[in-house]
């Protein structure tokens, strides 16, 4: 028995980079994913299908088209919700989709879903949507759950995992030591969990971090996002992960490079040097180093780099990078981060204490769960 699975995650369909929609780029990379899926027996999508809990209609249409094409190829698909998704909305029509071999995780109700791979009873696939301590405490009131690791350990400890089978887990959490990018700064700290919580599983298909990477061992792996979603990701090599399962001791992974429709990169130089660079449709952060300001430089350079997401000036007089065009607006920051900045503004730039931030995170976490259900 040899089975191959395409492991995807963090599609973030509907996302923007700066003011630019990435929807067309996402359509292109999903077509590439369909080509890779041709030689696979099934597909894992490990959360953050959409960029927002309430996705726009055009974003939903892109994902609908992708699933429809996978179903036409008779590829079983397994999907969990991530922290950017609404678990209730992702699982809508879930029962109906099962007829098309598409299994979607339902909102967490106290136990994990498990399904057997069609015509292969030895492979058991477990679905663990993004969990928070408050959500797990609702169902395990007798347990002491004060952290994300406590929450995940508790749920896994109550799962009837048969060690004789090949157990594959889809999860969307932040593993301690994982390489993060700018997108994930706000999720560090309390939501870290150790990779050893997954010791009972033969392959863990992770989502949440955008850099493709293994954690602890090769069979605990983040697929990474298929596109570069911030300038902190510009040096990452995006790829699709293909998992080959032969038996419990022989599970291999390979990375198939993604051909990016547009790259994400930082370019730096004087106005004259930048003007000599070739025309590019890439998403760029321009850093101009002239000591004397050049009138209308940003407008002129936009003709050469129409997808300018950020424009900064860096010279000896300023000493630091003065951003003229911020890469992301406040709406891209987490509520807890916005509170932290507001607190500092009101308190002479003093940071709130960690106990204060824990209370704030818990409040926003509870509000978020009420909103997403």
Image (cartoon, grey):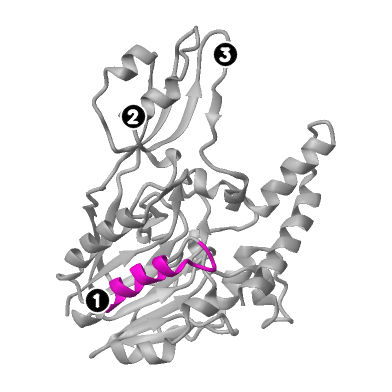
Q: Position of residue 265 (x, y in %)?
A: 36, 34
Please tell me whether mark 2 or mark 1 is closer to you in this view: 2
Residue 70 has which mark? 1
Q: Is residue 156 visible?
A: no
Residue 299: name its quadrant.
top left
Is residue 266 magenta-colored? no
Residue, far right? 347
Q: Nearer the viewer, residue 185 or 23?
A: 23
For the stretch drawn in magenta, the main secondary structure is helix
Label 3 close to label 1 by CB (< 8 Å): no
- Say which residue appears at 50% left-offset and 17% top-offset: 314
Label 3 to label 2: alpha-carbon separation = 28 Å
Residue 303 has which mark? 2
- Element at label 2: helix
Label 2 close to label 1 by CB (< 8 Å): no
Q: Earlier in the sequence, mark 2 or mark 1?
A: 1
Q: Earlier in the sequence, mark 3 or mark 2?
A: 2
> Which residue is label 3 attached to?
319
Q: Nearer the viewer, residue 227 or 253?
A: 227
Is residue 67 magenta-colored? yes
Task: State the extent of the magenta-drawn residues as a range.
Answer: 52-70
* 342 in relation to 370, above or below: above
Q: Is residue 348 left or right of residue 39?
A: right
- Element at label 1: helix
């Amino acid at each position: 028995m040899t089975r191959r699975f395409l492991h995807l995650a963090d599609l973030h369909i509907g996302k923007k980079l700066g003011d630019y929609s990435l929807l067309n780029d996402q359509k292109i990379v999903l077509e590439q994913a369909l080509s890779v899926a041709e030689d696979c027996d099934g597909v894992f999508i490990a959360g953050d299908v959409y960029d927002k809990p309430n996705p726009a209609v055009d974003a939903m249409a892109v994902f609908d088209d992708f699933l429809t094409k996978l179903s036409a190829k008779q590829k079983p698909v397994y999907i969990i919700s991530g922290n950017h998704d609404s678990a209730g909305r992702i699982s809508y029509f879930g029962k109906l989709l099962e007829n098309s071999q598409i299994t979607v995780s339902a909102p967490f109700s106290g136990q994990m879903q498990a399904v057997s791979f069609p015509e292969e009873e030895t492979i058991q696939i477990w679905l663990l949507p993004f969990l928070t301590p408050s959500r797990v405490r609702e169902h395990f009131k007798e347990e002491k759950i004060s952290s994300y690791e406590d929450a995940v350990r508790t749920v896994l400890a109550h799962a009837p995992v048969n060690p004789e089978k090949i157990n594959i887990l889809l999860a969307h959490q932040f593993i301690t030591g994982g390489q993060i990018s700018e997108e994930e700064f706000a999720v560090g700290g309390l939501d870290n969990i150790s990779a050893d919580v997954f010791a009972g599983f033969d392959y863990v298909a992770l989502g949440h971090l955008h850099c493709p990477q293994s954690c602890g061992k090769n069979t605990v792996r983040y697929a990474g996002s298929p596109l570069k979603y911030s300038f902190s990701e510009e040096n990452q090599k995006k790829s699709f992960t293909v998992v080959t399962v032969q038996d419990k001791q022989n599970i291999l992974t390979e990375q198939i490079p993604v051909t990016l429709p547009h790259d994400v990169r930082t370019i730096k130089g004087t106005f004259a040097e930048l003007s000599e660079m070739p025309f590019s449709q890439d998403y760029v952060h321009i850093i101009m180093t002239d000591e004397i300001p050049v009138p209308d430089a940003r407008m002129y350079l936009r003709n050469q780099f129409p997808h300018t997401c950020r424009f900064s000036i860096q010279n000896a007089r300023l000493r630091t990078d003065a951003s003229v065009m911020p890469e992301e607006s406040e709406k891209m920051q987490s509520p807890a981060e916005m509170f932290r900045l507001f607190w500092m503004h009101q308190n002479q730039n003093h940071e709130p204490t960690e106990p204060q931030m824990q209370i704030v995170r818990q409040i926003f976490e509870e509000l978020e769960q009420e909103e997403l259900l």
